Each structure stands twice: as structure tokens, then as C-alpha cells.
Image (spheres, rainbow, N blue to C red):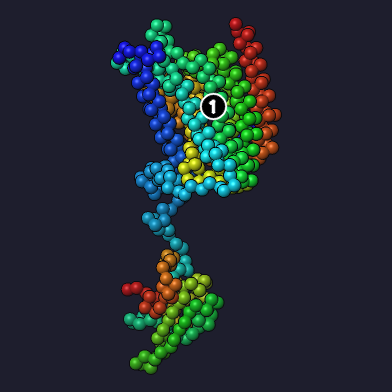
Amino acid sequence: MIMPLLKGLGITLSHLFKKPVTLQYPDEMPEVAPRFRGLHALNISHDKAKCVACYLCPTVCPAKCIKVEAGEDENHNKYAAEYEIDMLRCIFCGYCVEACPVDAVRMTQTFELANYKRADFVFTKDRLLEKK
Amino acid sequence: MDTLILGLPVAYYIAMIAKVLVAFVFVLLTVAYATYAERKIIGHMQVRLGPMRTGWHGLLQPIADGLKLFFKEEIIPAQSSKFAFLVAPLVALIPAFISFAVIPFGETITIGGYQIPLQIAAVYDPAGDRVLDVNVGVLYILGMASLGVYGIVLAGWSSNSKYSLLGGLRSSAQMVSYELAAGLAIVSVFMLSESLSLQKIVADQAGFAWYAFKQPVAFIVFFICSLAEINRTPFDLPEAETELVSGFCTEYSSMKYAMFFMAEYANMVTVCAVTTTLFLGGWHGPAFLPGWIWFIIKVYFLIFVCMWIRATYPRYRYDQLMRLGWKFFLPLTLLNVVATGIVVTLLK
């Protein structure tokens, strides 16, 4: 009866000298997994978004959070005149990335998505374009 | 300086006030930083960091906590018994602190020709070259320890809340049953010391003749029973937050809650100081450090052990607690008293 009690004390004492696993969050950022599904980004090629407004991503989206408006550019090519993702509805499933035939949308490692206004959670095309 | 007040020189009163102030402030600081140490030690034992944000490594945390509690809203339940509700925190806190009056925390020091014993309720008698202290110091401590129960019982009863009442009832039953075993453990100490004066008990333990070595059973039983008496884990049933919200102090807020919190930690410091005095040789230690430093080291080590125990063991169930107290510790201490009696008689 006494030995298990002493063993328990020994275990807690040995843990006292271990390195804590705590991450001092705002000071130290966590290393997220390489395939982490965070905030979306629209890929760019030749200074333009790669998106061709094929509507596959809003179709596949289970949360119905993607809104795309097609437009026609000077070369008579289809492009996304408007591309919005409502982050309050998005469930970060990544189906839009999988569905995209032209590799125009991807998910970044950004996970700090808090904001002050509901309107700020709707990410427009400008905000989604990958940063140069 | 030679004027006498009630037959004692003025210097006696000055020394007394100085001792009270120093000891009280020191105990108060220890209580404040015991809360910090507890969070840090338990945090590290759980491979966490504990408080880190307030000051360097969270060192200002007790001050921040105190300020926060001070500015919190004072809530007195409408159906409570007001007077008892207001008095209960004081009844819990004061006995926790005044036990320190009889604990010798250092050797007799000499300041300006006056011999000052480092014990609050003590005076140096130049005629007999000895220290006169309260000759029933141990009884006084036991008395104060049992007074502390009333604060918790009053709090539980006056709050008019079922959780508080259950907490108060539990604590009264628990404290009363563990007081017996703790008292009997002390009996075997003063069978050896043949005195209830703490000065004498400490003097008997000079040169590593600690009672912890002569009475190991009494030492361990006394320490465990003390933990039970001051409601620390694994015996913190009165507060058992998982089943009783927070027991007797459920309805308390602001400074009154802070007083219960302080009482709990002050009790822990007191119990560690009493254990040091009775079993670990008090302020005696190798001569390269002054006595009061040895006393502080021993007390802080015991406080660390309290926290260590808290980080290790889960809470006892109510029936297990009662069984441990009545069916295990009480017979064990009784046997210990009998065995001590036989050995003492045979050695004479």
C-alpha cells in the first residue's frame, strides 16, 4: 500500500524537472502541419488570378460559402470578376481546393481569423489574392 | 529604558512589537507567495509553466490576485444569517495566524545588551539565564487548530446554501476525527520531552536528535492528519469543487473569499511550522547558518511537500477518509503511545 504511494510521488517529482510543453502562444507561434487547412488564398499566374470562374468550388462547397461572378477580359477569356468566401460559414474542408481544375485556390497556414465586425469575415477577391 | 511596565522593562515591549511585526509580515508574504509557488510547482509537475504573464515569470501574480479580489463586488446572500456570515472568514483566518505566537523560530539573539528569544510569546529571564515561554504551547496550538473549524462550520451554516452546508458538515466531521489522531501523535512527542513548552521541545532536539527519528510513525501520522485538518488535498472534501461547487465558501466573494483563501494557506504554513518545531528539530541545524534560516528552510521544504502531495494524489472519498482516520490512524497512534510508554519506562 505504501510503495505505490511513494512511486506516485516519484513520478510527479521527476515531472517537475521535465521541460514544460506549454507554448507561450502570442509570443511563440505554433508550427502548424504542412497540409494545415487555414485561410484560403487565390493563386496568381502572370499577375492575374488563375481562377477561370468554372463554378466548381461553389458547387462542391458543403457550406455554400463561396460566391463567384464570372466576367470576360480583353482577350475574351472567362475570369472571376468577383470571388468571395464567407469565413463565418466556411468549414475549412478543403473541397474547393480539391475540386479546382486549374489549381487557382489553395489553403494557407493562417489560423488567426478573429475580427471585430461580421462584414470583415467576408473575404473578397482582393483579400484572398496571394500576397506578393 | 529602565522604567518598568507591569514588571517588565520597556525594551521587552519594543522587542515584542518588533517580533510580532516581523513574524506577521513574513508569514503574510509567505502565504501570498505560497499561492504562487503552489501554482508554479503543480504546473511544472504537470509539465506546464504556471503563471508567466504578470511580472517576470509571473512573480507579481499574488499581488494581482489580491488586487482583483479586493475590487470585486461584495455579495451577501439575502437569506443568509448576516452576522455569522460576516464573522466566519475572520474566525477562520485569525486562529491560522495566532498559532505563530508560540512557535520558536530562532535562537536567542542579543541586541544592545538585551537577550531576545526569537519566539513571540517568550521572554528572556536574566536571573535564571533561560527563556520563559508559554508552558502549554502545544495545547495552545491544538486549541487554535480546533478553533479554525468553527470558521468553516459557521460559513457553511450561515450561507443558507446546500453546498455550503454540506461542505461545512463534512469539514466538521473530518477535522474532529483527525484532530484525535494528530493529538495522540503529539502525545508521544511530549512523552519524550516531558514538557508542553515548545522551547523545551526544540531544545531537546539539538544536534540532530530530531523527534522525527525517534518517533517516525508519530511524525508521518501527524503530518498527514494535519493535512486532513487544514483541508488540503487529498483531504479537501469540504471544498470538493467537483461535487460541492466550492463547499463552504460557495456564497463568498471579494475580500471575504480572499480571507478564506488566506486562512487555508496560513494554516498550511502554520502546520508546517508546527511539524518543524515538534519533529524536525525546530531552528536547530548545522552552525554555519543562523537558526531562523534553518527554520525557514525546513518550513519551506514541508510546504513544498504539501504541494507535491497535492500534485500527486486524487481526493479521498468521504467513507475512505473516515476509515483512514478512525480505523487506521487512531489505533496506530494509540499503539505508538503505548509502545513509547513502555520504552520510556524501561529506559528509566
Residue at image position (47%, 86%) is A54
Sort mark 1 into few (<14), some (14-19) or many (20+) by Cα contacts within 10 Å: some
Q: Is residue B297 above or below residue B261?
A: above
Q: Is residue B4 visible?
A: yes
Q: Residue at x 54, y 27 (%)?
A: B144
x and y, in percent, of residue B14 in the image: 35, 21
In the image shown, does A131 or A33 lie closer to the viewer?
A131
Residue A42 x %, y %: 40, 77
Camera-nearest residue between B283 and B93: B93
Pick whichever, B64 or B316, lies toward us.
Answer: B64
Residue A44, picture quadrant? bottom left
| Chain letter of the residue beneath label 1 in the structure image | B
Q: Position of residue B5 (x, y in %)?
A: 37, 15
Towards the viewer: A118 or B192: A118
Query: What residue lies at 40% left-to-right and 25% top-to-bottom?
Result: B20
- Say which quadrant the C terminus of chain B sits in: top right
Give the quarter of the image for residue A118: bottom left
Residue A129 higher or lower than B267, as above or below: below
Q: Which residue is mark 1?
A: B144
User: Residue A20, how many percent across, how many down?
Assistant: 45, 47
Find numbered disc 1 in the image and state the secondary structure of the residue it sits on: helix
Q: Amino acid at mark 1?
A: Met
